[in-house]
Image (spheres, coloured by chain):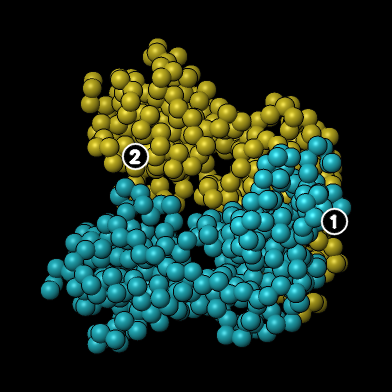
Chain colours: A yellow, B cyan
Amino acid sequence: MKNGKYGISDVAEMLGVSKSTVSRVINGNEGVGPELRKKVMDFINEIGYQPNTIAQSLSKGRMNIVALILGDIRNPFYADLTFNIQRILNDNGYMVMVLNSEYNIDRELEFLKLTEQFNFAGLILITAQEKAIEERLKNMEMPKVLVNRILPYYTGDSVLIDNFQAGYQATMHLIELGHRHIGFIKGPGVSSASSQRFAGYRQVLENYGFSFDEKCVFESDLKLETGRALAQQFLEIKERPSAMVVVNDMTAIGFMDGCRKAGIRIPEELSIISFDDIAMASMYGIELTTISQHVDEMGEKAAHLMLKQLNDKDAKTERIIMEPTLIVRKTTCECSEI
Amino acid sequence: MKNGKYGISDVAEMLGVSKSTVSRVINGNEGVGPELRKKVMDFINEIGYQPNTIAQSLSKGRMNIVALILGDIRNPFYADLTFNIQRILNDNGYMVMVLNSEYNIDRELEFLKLTEQFNFAGLILITAQEKAIEERLKNMEMPKVLVNRILPYYTGDSVLIDNFQAGYQATMHLIELGHRHIGFIKGPGVSSASSQRFAGYRQVLENYGFSFDEKCVFESDLKLETGRALAQQFLEIKERPSAMVVVNDMTAIGFMDGCRKAGIRIPEELSIISFDDIAMASMYGIELTTISQHVDEMGEKAAHLMLKQLNDKDAKTERIIMEPTLIVRKTTCECSEI
């Protein structure tokens, strides 16, 4: 009974059900009927089951590592995602190795090579949209989960929000407030999340017959300082837009900072909407209107997709698409130029 | 020549110097005289040396992992620290496994067990101050670096700021502004950084003959939401202090948010100073007065201490103590009650 604790196998054996059933119930996953779920839960509560500790799960002496490739752990969106993925995988006996690509394709390719070379148990990635990467992924036979990205020919498990819809929704919010001249700050060219959001924005302009102005489109590497620096470029535009859609909260917060320090009043003179809804977005003095990507849920779903594949080699492929949610705070208001 | 690139060993051999000399010059470390440094640099530039890629460094087929145990990667201070440690260790052929203890001692003990069990190359830790942990560390014979923490009997390599001095400096800043009734928000009891800062605060009160008021001391788990929740407790104090020293920027930002939403004007009615200087601290609308811990430099120094031990088993033990720096922004002002 391992230090007085019961493991998933013990519970399964005692109840005469499969291990994956017990695991599903514990992790709150679907695929178990309400009656069976209740039976398992009641039993678990009765015996005082506690999830295995990592050390117990690893008692076979083998370390199972899942690689997690992302752009930059300093971005709070990635840090939140990582935390949730790691917690769930740890609790199920897997370690997570975080690898910062720094949005560099060569570095990412190296990490993929490494993941294969050292026979990692699985791979979760928020990847660059790039042919070389897609080619390599195709030949990697390990469990894989793609997070918040689309790759044209990738057919494995993935979880994402509908980034096109998110871009569409953000721009529509501004249109409804009467804005007609709307700019955009994109993310790195290799991010499909960014290009999808941009496509949603273009679509709104087209649908409503507003002209697209190349001069009001900028590019960010998703960092706060970059947003701040872009404010300088923004100030140099002759006919400034009355609203901006910004690829992520960190860039938006830096951009707002630069604009406000230059005397632009937000939202009175410039409305700003972005994407992510990081903890900081709700802060007094920031109160950013943003599109939530439900990062905690996204991380949990990514971890569960990985566990599903790790537990069952023949599991059916899933593509989970989550709905973005508009959160209106204080950085957008009615356009004063109408 | 490995894909046309030279490695550190190649450079060392061609120049007839030791590998560690070349490594020191490349990483900008001390311990190499100016002449030799110039000779190495000139040669490197001449042959077009580029640092080894990770994959090349790992070509021996062995994966060297350094464990990095910390509280919670979602705290920007830890994310910044991690990023820098990881970048330098990766460039030198080591992978970093980040382990979130969630400030839980049992979990940390488990991670330590794991680190030994799987024969990790080294261990960098921002640990809890706890006897059980210290006991275990004493018996672990791998390269270890303690970051921003003090353990009474730990004698290995470490890098930290003088947290007592940081607490002293923060409180002195408030005293100089005329504040007499000053509260404190502590970190988790197991953090020596927090208890040292608190000790510095107590020392100032004692030195200047101001009374210590237990009712104005709170505790945070370093998270933004906790700071926000503590604002409610703060509001219930009958005789509120005119200034607060807060253990970290994230707690302070949440605390300010809660106070401002309840109508307290900062800094006019309440001065706030904290510790860390995360990127967000300089933002318009936040502009937090804080004590910088020089996180980038701290991460770099931690990585270099680890590399030193990995390259030379008999390297001399070092304890690097960095000076905290006061950064005055807009959350502190002269006490209006004088």
Question: Horizontal and vertical percent for residue B143?
Answer: 72, 71
User: Quick check: B62 above or below B54?
Assistant: below
User: Quick check: A169 above or below A10?
Assistant: above
Is the residue under label 1 in contact with that under label 2 (CB below 8 Å)?
A: no
Residue at 74% of width from left, 78% of height from top? B140
Q: Would residue A219 be found to the left or right of residue B100 on screen?
A: left
The residue closer to the viewer here, B152 or B286, is B152
The residue closer to the viewer here, B48 or B192, is B48
Picture quadrant where residue A315 is located: top right
Residue type, numbered disc 2: Gly
The residue closer to the viewer here, A300 or B148, is B148
Residue sticking out furthest to the front: B35
Picture quadrant where residue B137 is located: bottom right
- For disc 1, the chain is B
Same chain under badges 2 and 1? The reply is no
Residue at 24% of width from left, 87% of height from top? B209
Residue type, numbered disc 1: Arg
Crowding at dot 1, Cα within 10 Å, few <14 / some 14-19 / many 20+, comes out as few
What numbered label is drawn on residue A258?
2
Label 2, label 1: how many angstroms apart (C-alpha)? 47 Å
Q: Which residue is mark 1?
A: B62
Residue at 71% of width from left, 72% of height from top? B315
Residue at 52% of width from left, 41% of height from top? A293
Q: Would residue B296 be found to the left or right of residue B239 on screen?
A: right
Question: Horizontal and vertical percent for residue A106?
Answer: 70, 36
- For disc 2, the chain is A
